[in-house]
Amino acid sequence: MKKNEPIPATELHLGKLIKAELERQGRTAVWLAKQANCTPENIYKACRAQWITMPLLFKISRALEYDFFKECSKRLNVGEP
């Protein structure tokens, strides 16, 4: 894969992206759980999962002010074989 080539959807790992953004912002899973109105265990699970539910991803995106959906859509190759 070339340097600026998008990561294929099969290699996308939302949990790793969420964890990296949490670390970049200096926030904790406990903080995120409060913001997303869920348990810290749900956040820890999300950070380990390649894919998570859309409602939880929406809450996490809002709390972190980061569009994780855009990360997914970057990998769309609509019309390509």
Image: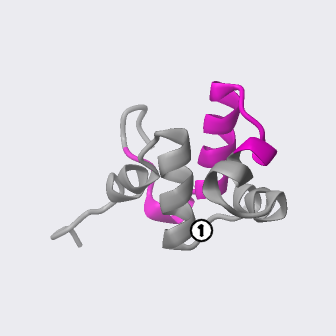
Report the number of numbered marks: 1
The quarter holding residue 8 reads bottom left
- Residue appearing at x 77%, y 46% in the figure: 29
Q: How crowded is the residue under tag 1: few (<14 C-alpha within 10 Å), some, or many (20+)?
A: few
Magenta-span inclusion, residue 52 = no
> Where are the magenta residues, as a range?
6-31
- Residue appearing at x 33%, y 58% in the figure: 73
Closer-to-camera residue (25/80): 25
Q: In this rendering, would 31 be left or right of 12?
A: right
Q: Is residue 64 above or below residue 49?
A: above
Closer-to-camera residue (71/59): 59
Q: Which residue is mark 1?
A: 51
Closer-to-camera residue (45/65): 65
* Rendered-image quadrant of the N terminus: top left
* Rendered-image quadrant of the C terminus: bottom left
Q: Residue 48: percent from the left, percent from the top?
A: 76, 59
**Chief secondary structure of the magenta portion:** helix
- Residue appearing at x 48%, y 49% in the figure: 62
Q: In this rendering, would 15 be left or right of 72?
A: right
Callout 1, which amino acid? Trp
Q: Residue 16: percent from the left, percent from the top?
A: 66, 48
Residue at far right of view: 41
Magenta-span inclusion, residue 29 = yes
Q: Residue 72: percent from the left, percent from the top?
A: 41, 58
Colouring mode (rainbow / by chain / secondary structure / one colour):
one colour
Closer-to-camera residue (68/10): 68
Q: Dot 1 lies on which element? A: loop
Q: Is residue 10 above or below residue 47?
A: below
The quarter holding residue 53 reads bottom right
